[in-house]
Amino acid sequence: MDLLIVGSGLFGLTVAERAAAAGRRVTVIDRRDHIGGNAYSEAEPETGIEVHRYGAHLFHTSNATVWEYVNRFTEFTSYVHRVYTNHAGVVYPLPINLGTINQFFAAAYSPEQARRLIASQASEYDPKTAASLEERAIGLIGRPLYEAFIRDYTAKQWQTHPRELPAEVISRLPVRYTYDNRYFNDTWEGLPVDGYTAWMERMVDHPLIDVRLSTDFFDETQPWNKRAAIGQLPVVYTGAVDRYFDYEGGELSWRTLDFEQDVLSVGDHQGTSVMNYADASVPYTRVHEFKHFHPERADRYPTDRTVIAREYSRFASREDEPYYPVNTPDDRAKLLSYREMQRVEKDVHFGGRLGTYQYLDMHMAIASALNMWNNVLA
Ligand code: FAD
Ligand code: UDP
């Protein structure tokens, strides 16, 4: 074996695929009983509707190299993501756009009038120098829209007041002075035609790749464990960085999600794939209705049933799956100490969302894995 990869998420699979293509023998281990990490999806058994077990995943990118790479393993549908939000019992389009603004202020502002109104409401902070998510959001959209659509949703999602969150988190949410309500600005987007799992299985369908599931790197009863591997061969580690060092530098805070999935006896529950709930009075952040991700499968999906999942967010304990780095100032200080510890680990390469404690979309995880392969491992 030439390389051990811990974690079969898109980061680990990309490195495995590149290494095998270059003639290297690779073992990929994952403690879960399936490949694909958080992008994994499966058919819900009663209805056959594809559900994303770890939350809805929408592929989008403007990186031509990544787009060319992923298209080697799957075709993508023409799905375009749009999200709506329920505030005080009324549904508004997201991201915040002229439609949202006019509906919220019960007005018919032109783009210029809306810009002027928002500028007058946003003058408290300069988004460029904002020190927190709250300051950036108010500087971008003004206090009334912030309080309606961002403040409570963000507090529910991150279990942290927006004042203590980094400003960058909100950069992901654009504001538009047109009626364009595409959620993503990227050049390419779509969903894998025959599902995420089929895509990811094709990435590792190679005689030089051995995949071992239900295999934990820290379990010393299995042969590919940390103690046996380190120093013997290069290791790509995509699990949580604090866990790797046995929490020596303190625990990094992560957010985890709980999904409450239901099969409902109606053909259509909410008319769209994702409905956010902006208010603190509703305990979940959003409801996913999976059949709407694949309108092209209408003839294969039942017309009298649908699958939904309510998403709840909370802090992760050590036993939970760490999904999102919370990234408070305290976390960033701990991360620096982990980076120091990584420097002395012999031939261990930390990657992916958990290994770098970074908020990475799928295309970013793939781009970063391609970089690691091309610039470090190859
Ligand atoms: P992961 O997918 O987390 O894979 C890491 C793997 O390592 C896991 O399978 C885990 O079981 C394994 N592992 C951890 N510790 C060990 C151990 N000790 N031993 C063995 N194996 C271990 N991206 C988008 O582009 N669009 C989206 O719409 C989107 N939505 C998302 C929604 C949610 C709720 C989440 C959590 C993420 C979302 N993402 C989305 C991001 C996407 O999931 C990641 O970019 C992608 O999965 C990154 O892959 P990764 O390999 O870094 O990590
Ligand atoms: N956000 C919000 N209200 C919404 C949707 C998003 O305040 O209705 C904020 C929230 O802080 C969130 C960030 O925008 O963390 C990014 O949202 P996105 O939907 O991109 O996050 P993800 O899908 O990764 O959870």
Image (tube, rainbow, N blue to C red):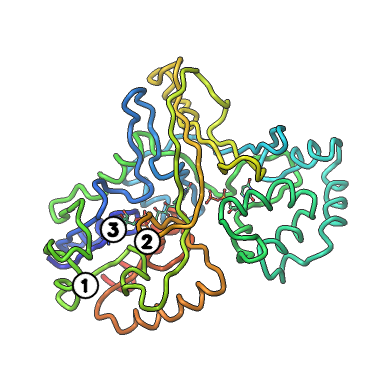
Label 3 neighbourhood size at 10 Å, few (<14), some (14-19), many (20+)? many
Amino acid bearing label 1? Pro
Q: Position of residue 244 (x, y in %)?
A: 31, 70
Tell which of 215 and 318 is nearer to you: 318
CA gap between label 3 and label 2 equals 17 Å
CA gap between label 3 and label 1 equals 14 Å
Label 1 neighbourhood size at 10 Å, few (<14), some (14-19), many (20+)? some
- Mark 2 or 1: in front is 2
Location of mark 2 (residue)? 318
Amino acid bearing label 2? Arg
Q: Which quarter shows the C terminus?
A: bottom left
Instruction: Using the rendered view, name the quadrant where residue 49 is placed.
Output: top left
CA gap between label 2 and label 1 equals 27 Å
Q: Residue at x 68, y 70 (%)?
A: 131
Residue 119 vertical position relative to residue 285 in the rendered view, above or below: below
Residue 185 vertical position relative to residue 19 in the rendered view, above or below: above
Q: Which quarter shows the N terminus?
A: bottom left
Task: Pick whichever of labels 3 and 1 is earlier in the sequence.
Answer: 3
Residue 93 vertical position relative to residue 211 in the rendered view, above or below: above
Location of mark 1 (residue)? 234
Is disc 2 placed on a helix, strand or loop?
loop
Task: Pick whichever of labels 3 and 2 is earlier in the sequence.
Answer: 3
Is disc 3 placed on a helix, strand or loop?
loop
Ligand 1 is within 8 Å of the C-beta of the residue at disc 2: no
Label 2 neighbourhood size at 10 Å, few (<14), some (14-19), many (20+)? few
Task: Pick whichever of labels 2 and 1 is earlier in the sequence.
Answer: 1
Q: Which mark is residue 7?
A: 3
Q: Residue at x 87, y 52 (%)?
A: 116
Q: Residue at x 51, y 49 (%)?
A: 313
- Mark 3 or 2: in front is 2
Amino acid bearing label 3? Gly
Q: Position of residue 245 (x, y in %)?
A: 32, 74
